[in-house]
Amino acid sequence: MSKKFFFLSLLLCLMAAPVQAEILTINKVPDELKALRAAYVEQMANASTPQKLKKLQHEFEAAKAKSLLSPTFTKNVSSLEKARDLEVKKIQDRYNDRIKAMRKETLVSVERKYQVVFDSFKNQTGKNVKNQYIIDLKRLETKLIRQNDLAGALVVQTARNKAMGISATAATSAPVKKSAATVTKPVAPKPAVKKVASPTPKAAPAQNKVARKAPAPTRRLSAAAPQIYASQTKGLAGSGSNVSNNIYAFDVQLFGNQTWLSFNGYGRQTNNSFGEVYLITPGNQRHQVASWSPDQLKASNYFGVKSAKDVEAIRTDISQLVNATGTYQVEFTYRDGNEPLTIYQVEIKTW
């Protein structure tokens, strides 16, 4: 027991020696601990607090406002706004153009209708009505002569002379053959039945020939054998100075009871064109006889219009206006649309 106690005491003494040494050196602070303590103090000084968070929030808002006032940002925004305004203007212009086109298309039918009404109203002056009455009397007189109704023709001739202001006493008493030539001046023979009766059978053909220059018996006009006056001179009817060869003149010497005007025309690329066609008679009276529009300009060639055969003709009846020999002019006047009218052929057919 004494030996065991001795060794145990010795062991305890040996174990107690280093413990006592550590306690002796506790006042020495390691460098790592110093570093940790310094970091801790700094972190605590910078620790988040409500006041610091509010201050940081103010700095954030101020920084955002300052960035939006920077020269680079304002320059880029100004460029984008200009580009945006240009795009908006293009869109507005495009839609305004479409609205304008729709307005024109809506009003064109009304304008076309009242243009004809206005032209007709302007021509219905007292002088024009009287001239038309004289022309109608002349046509009736010629018709009665062709029917060999010489007495009726003489009555109509008297009425025509009266309308022209030629008195019965001023009429010549010469034979009908001579007076027939004076009708075109105009001077009519004296409407005395006794003096006209005897030479009437020979005078009637001469009077018919001089008054209307009707075709000879060997040249009878009919629907199967009409008289055709045509021109294939290429013309252009546009706006401003964009006009060339838009008036066609025809020397009409033979004509019948039926006379039709036809023309073949089209735009340069499309049929978007509007206009009117006028007939100028030998008496220099101007009448609107037709018009053209996209609905009327119809191409018959899928590959494009190059000549008269590539487009359908537009026809109109001018029988009431072709009632005497002389020069008739057909005038094409552009009114609206994206295209001028290219005229390929103009034709007057009578029988």
Image: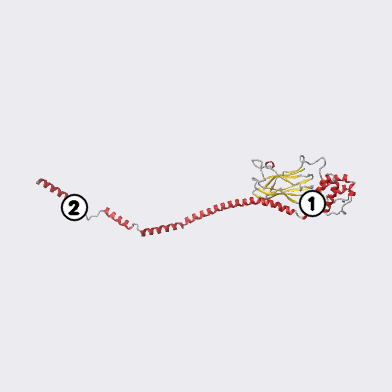
Are there few (<14), some (14-19), or many (20+) residues within 10 Å of tag 1?
some
Find residue 21 and name its label: 2
Give the camera-side residue of 102 and 275: 102
Does residue 95 appear to the left or right of 32 in the view shown? right
Mark 2, secondary structure of its residue = helix
Label 2 CA crowd tier, 10 Å (few <14, some 14–19, many 20+): few
Q: SS class of the residue under badge 1?
A: helix
Specify the label residue 310 is tagged with: none
Task: Give the amino acid type for the residue marked by disc 1 in the picture.
Answer: Tyr
2 or 275: which is nearer to us? 275
* Type of the residue with mark 2: Ala
Instruction: State whether residue 41 is above or below residue 260.
Output: below
Residue shown at the point (16%, 49%) measured from the top left: 15
* Position in image of residue 327 (x %, y %): 77, 48
Q: Is residue 50 visible?
A: yes
Look at the image and tell me whether residue 209 can be seen: no
Mark 1 and mark 2: span between their CA atoms? 152 Å
Q: Quadrant of residue 256?
A: top right
Residue positioned 47% across, 55% down in the render: 73
Which mark sits nearer the N-terminus, 1 or 2? 2
Residue in view at x 29 percent, y 54 percent: 36
User: Tag count in the figure?
Assistant: 2
In this picture, residue 123 sits left or right of residue 29 = right
Residue receiving disc 1: 133
> What x and y, as percent, mark residue 131?
79, 52
Which image quarter holds the N terminus?
top left
